[in-house]
Amino acid sequence: MLLVVDANIIFSALLMRGKPLSVFELNALLNKFELISPEYVFFEIGRRVDKILAYSHFSKEEFIRVFSFIKGEIELIPFDTFRNKLEEAKPKSPHEEDIPYIALSLEFDCKILSGDRELKTCLPDRVITPSEAVEILLGRKPP
């Protein structure tokens, strides 16, 4: 199952661990999801590394290990691949920063993995939460 990973999930995995990090860990073992994201997603995270380190419970070494692991689980998709879906994505998006994730989702006709409640409210059939993803990975819920 193909899923677009938004920056929200990566931030949550790095800050709080919990279900967002469990999605990446379980998927590394079970390989049920193919995870994709716009190519710039890690630049977005990288700009906030100091803030993440200040609020997370990770040491710098542990942060580097977990961040590297997450990066290895996500295939980055070039902007030109989904540029043609940006206009279609705009009216569906609660926030401007969500537009590329929605456009990528539209381009590949797949769901978005996100913990953003507003995004889930706007696109209930297109967004799955970390809790839902864990249930799918464990076979407790159909994809």
Image (cartoon, rainbow, N blue to C red):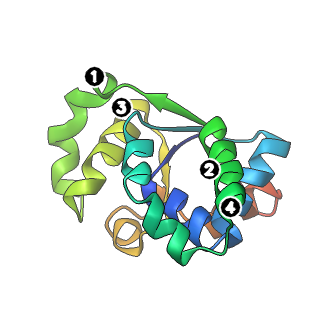
Residue density around tag 1, few if under 14, some if 14–19, many if 20 or more, within 10 Å: few
Between disc 1 and disc 3, the foreground one is 1
Amino acid marked by disc 4: Leu
Q: Left or right? Give the position of 89 relative to 22.
A: left
Number of numbered tags placed on the structure image = 4
- Residues tagged 2 and 1 counted as in contact (Cβ below 8 A): no
Residue depicted at x 77% and y 53%: 25
Between disc 3 and disc 4, the foreground one is 4
Between disc 1 and disc 4, the foreground one is 4
Residue depicted at x 37% and y 53%: 47
Regarding mark 2 in the picture, which secondary structure is present there? helix
Label 3 belongs to which residue? 107
Nearest to N terminus: mark 2 or mark 1: 2
Nearest to N terminus: mark 1 or mark 4: 4
As drawn, the label of residue 67 is: 2
- Residues tagged 1 and 4 counted as in contact (Cβ below 8 A): no
Q: CA distance from mark 3 to mark 4?
A: 26 Å
Between disc 2 and disc 3, the foreground one is 2
Across and down, in percent, residue 142 comes to 71, 55
Q: CA distance from mark 1 to mark 3?
A: 11 Å
Q: CA distance from mark 2 to mark 3?
A: 27 Å
Q: CA distance from mark 4 to mark 2?
A: 10 Å
As drawn, the label of residue 21 is: 4
Amino acid marked by disc 3: Glu
Amino acid marked by disc 2: Phe
Residue density around tag 2, few if under 14, some if 14–19, many if 20 or more, within 10 Å: some
Across and down, in percent, residue 53 comes to 54, 67
Regarding mark 3 in the picture, which secondary structure is present there? helix
Q: CA distance from mark 1 to mark 4?
A: 29 Å
Across and down, in percent, residue 1 comes to 64, 39
Q: Left or right? Give the position of 64 relative to 94.
A: right
Label 1 belongs to which residue? 80
